[in-house]
Image (spheres, rainbow, N blue to C red):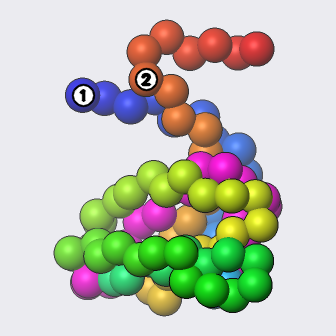
Amino acid sequence: MAITVKVNGEIIDNPSDNNIGSADFVHCTAISGAQSVIVKNSEGGVIGSLYLHTAGDTIIIEKGKTDTITLADGKASAATTCFGTWNKN
């Protein structure tokens, strides 16, 4: 199933505790081999983490506006996702 993604910001290389412009949804891509994506709350506590198996693997993460993303060797960008017809309102 294809996902429609609306880009909402610039690409951030190798984000470290970055809130990605206060984005609600973040598109993450591994650039070099296996990578961990770590999501933390505004106090620095780990909410969760996930594993991208190889370069080119991607995931879209839903997070709170003040939550941060760390992806040691990858790229992240703010996005809005939509399943089905896009509503521009």
Residue at 59% x, 50% y is: 25
Q: Amino acid at mark 1?
A: Met
- Asked whether the residues under the numbered discs 1 and 2 touch, taking CB atoms below 8 Å apart as contact, a structural biologist would say yes
Q: Quadrant of residue 88?
A: top right
Q: Quadrant of residue 68?
A: bottom right
Tag 2 secondary structure: loop
x%, y% of residue 80? 61, 38
| Structural crowding at the residue carrying mark 2, measured as other residues with C-alpha within 10 Å and reported as few (<14), some (14–19) or many (≥20) | few
Q: Amino acid at mark 2?
A: Phe
| Figure quadrant of the C terminus | top right
Residue at 61% x, 58% y is: 63
Residue 8 visible in this rendered orientation of the protein: yes
Residue marked by disc 2: 83
**Magenta segment boundaries in residue numbering:** 18-34
Classify 23 as above or below 49.
above
**For residue 89, side relative to residue 13 (left or right):** right
x%, y% of residue 46? 55, 83
x%, y% of residue 57? 28, 64
Label for residue 1? 1
**For residue 53, side relative to residue 29 (left or right):** left
The majority secondary structure of the magenta stretch comes to loop
Residue 69 in magenta?
A: no
Residue 31 visible in this rendered orientation of the protein: no
Task: Give the mark nearer the N terminus: 1 vs 2.
Answer: 1
Mark 1 to mark 2 CA distance (whole Å): 9 Å
x%, y% of residue 70? 56, 82
Residue at 26% x, 83% y is: 34
Comparing 12 with 67, the one in front is: 67
